[in-house]
Image: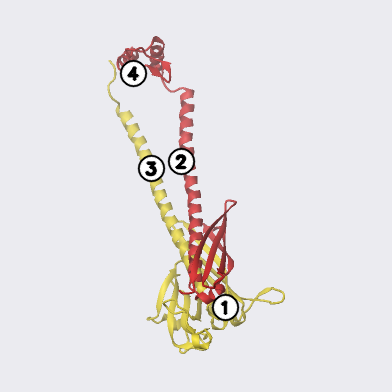
Chain colours: A red, B yellow
C-alpha cells in the first residue's frame, strides 16, 4: 500500500514524458498504467535481481578496466618520455662536445658510437641502445662547416630518431 | 505508517563504505606520489649518468694513454688534459698548433658512493701529457686529493661500479685484448653503474662506453 502511495506521489511530480523514446507518462506527468504497475511491483520486490547484479558487476569491471588502462598508458608514456629525454640529453652533450673543438679541428670530433644504457628495476635489467651519428661537412669556400647529429633508438619495435644541425664559421 | 529518513544501520553502512572508498583513494594517491618520486629519482639518476659520460668522453678523448692513472679501490681515474677551466683548448701557435697540457682532472668515487670530478690547474705547462704519479710532484694520489682546497663538483650519487678496462686492438687481426698497462691501450672500456633504494624497491642505471685517448 505504501508503495502504491509512493508511486502515486511520484507521478504527481513532473516527470519526463518519454524515457529513451518510450512513452512513460501522459502530458500531465501521470504515469501510464503499465509503468505504474511496473513501479509498484518493483517497489514491493525485496533484494536484487541477477540482471542487476550482472549490470553492476559489468559497470565495476569497466571502471577497474578503465583505471588499469589509464595506468598502463601512463607507464608507456613515461617510458617514451624517458627515452626521448635521454636521446635529447645525448644529442645536446654530443653537440656541446663537437662545438668545443676549434674550427680547423672539427673533423677530429666526428664519430659514430652506440651508447647502451641498462635500467634496473628490482634487479631486473632492461637494455636501451642509442646510436649516435655525427657528420661534419665543409662548404666549398672553406668558410663554414655543417655539423649534423642524429640519435636513433628502438622503442617497442619502432625506430625513432632525433636530429639536430648547426653551423660553425671560420670567422668565429 | 510509512517510514521517514534513514536508519542508524543504513547511516553506519554508508559511513563505512565512504571510509573504505576514502581510504582506497588515499592509498592510490600515496602510491601515485611515491611513483612520481621514483620517476623523478630515476630521471635524475639517468641524467647524472649521461652527464658524467659526456664529460668523461670529452676529457678522456683529449688526453694521452701515458697520462692516465686508474686505481680500482677506491675507484679513480686521473689524467692531464689540454683544456682550461673556461673550456678553451691550450695550443702553442708558434709550434704548429701543438697542444700543451695544463690541467689535471680526476674522477673519484667517495666513501659516500658519490662520484666527484676534481679539477686542478697545473703549476707548469707540459708539452707531453704528464703521468699523475711519475711526472708530478707531489704525486697526485688518493692522499693528495683528500686534502681540501682542490676544486671539485659532484657528478653522480649511488655509484655501485666505476671500472676502467684498458683494451688494446691488434692492428692486423682487429682482435681486442685487455692490457695491464694503460699506456699500451688503444681505448678504455668504462662502466658506470648507479643505484638508489626507494623503500623496498631498488632502481639502477648502468652504461658502458669505449673511450679513446687521442693525444
Residue B9 image offset from top left, x and y in percent: 32, 29
The mark nearer the N terminus, 3 or 1, is 3
Mark 1 vs mark 4: tell me if same chain: no
Determine the chain carrying the residue at label 3: B
Density class for disc 1 (Cα within 10 Å; few <14, some 14-19, many ≥20) is: few
What numbered label is drawn on residue B25?
Answer: 3
Residue at 56 percent of width and 83 percent of height: B66
The mark nearer the N terminus, 4 or 2, is 4
Marks 1 and 2: CB-CB under 8 Å? no
Residue B193 visible, this orientation: yes
Q: Secondary structure at mark 1?
A: loop
Residue position marked by numbered label 4 in the rendering: A15
Residue at 42 percent of width and 53 percent of height: B36
Residue B49 visible, this orientation: no
Residue at 44 percent of width and 79 percent of height: B84
Determine the chain carrying the residue at label 1: B
Residue position marked by numbered label 2 in the rendering: A67
Residue position marked by numbered label 1 in the rendering: B214
Amino acid at each position: 500500500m505504501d508503495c502504491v502511495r509512493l508511486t502515486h506521489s511520484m507521478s504527481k511530480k513532473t516527470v519526463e514524458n518519454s524515457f529513451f523514446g518510450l512513452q512513460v507518462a501522459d502530458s500531465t506527468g501521470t504515469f501510464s498504467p503499465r509503468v505504474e504497475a511496473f513501479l509498484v511491483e518493483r517497489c514491493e520486490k525485496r533484494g536484487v535481481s541477477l540482471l542487476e547484479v550482472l549490470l553492476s558487476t559489468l559497470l565495476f569491471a569497466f571502471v577497474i578496466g578503465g583505471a588499469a588502462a589509464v595506468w598502463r598508458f601512463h607507464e608507456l608514456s613515461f617510458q617514451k618520455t624517458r627515452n626521448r629525454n635521454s636521446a635529447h640529453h645525448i644529442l645536446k652533450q654530443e653537440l656541446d662536445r663537437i662545438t668545443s673543438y676549434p674550427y680547423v679541428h672539427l673533423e677530429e670530433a666526428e664519430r659514430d658510437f652506440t651508447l647502451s644504457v641498462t635500467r634496473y628495476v628490482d634487479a631486473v635489467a632492461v637494455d636501451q641502445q642509442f646510436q649516435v651519428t655525427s657528420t661534419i661537412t665543409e662548404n666549398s669556400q672553406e668558410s663554414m662547416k655543417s655539423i649534423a647529429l642524429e640519435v636513433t633508438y628502438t622503442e617497442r619495435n619502432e625506430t625513432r630518431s632525433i636530429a639536430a644541425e648547426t653551423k660553425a664559421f671560420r670567422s668565429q | 505508517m510509512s517510514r521517514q529518513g534513514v536508519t542508524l544501520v543504513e547511516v553506519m553502512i554508508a559511513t563505512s563504505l565512504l571510509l573504505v572508498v576514502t581510504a582506497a583513494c588515499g592509498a592510490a594517491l600515496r602510491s601515485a606520489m611515491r611513483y612520481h618520486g621514483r620517476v623523478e629519482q630515476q630521471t635524475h639518476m639517468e641524467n647524472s649518468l649521461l652527464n658524467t659520460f659526456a664529460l668523461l668522453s670529452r676529457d678522456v678523448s683529449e688526453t694521452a694513454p701515458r697520462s692516465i692513472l686508474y686505481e680500482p679501490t677506491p675507484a679513480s681515474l686521473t689524467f692531464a688534459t689540454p683544456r682550461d677551466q673556461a673550456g678553451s683548448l691550450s695550443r702553442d701557435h708558434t709550434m704548429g698548433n701543438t697542444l700543451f697540457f695544463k690541467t689535471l682532472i680526476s674522477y673519484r668515487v667517495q666513501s659516500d658512493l658519490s662520484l666527484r670530478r676534481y679539477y686542478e690547474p697545473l703549476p707548469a705547462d707540459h708539452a707531453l701529457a704528464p703521468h699523475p704519479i711519475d711526472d708530478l710532484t707531489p704525486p697526485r694520489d688518493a692522499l693528495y686529493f683528500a686534502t681540501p682546497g682542490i676544486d671539485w663538483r659532484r657528478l653522480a650519487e649511488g655509484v655501485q661500479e666505476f671500472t676502467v678496462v684498458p683494451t688494446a686492438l691488434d692492428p692486423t687481426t682487429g682482435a681486442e685484448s685487455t692490457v695491464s698497462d694503460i699506456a699500451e691501450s688503444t681505448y678504455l672500456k668504462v662502466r658506470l653503474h648507479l643505484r638508489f633504494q626507494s623503500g623496498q624497491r631498488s632502481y639502477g642505471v648502468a652504461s658502458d662506453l669505449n673511450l679513446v685517448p687521442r693525444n
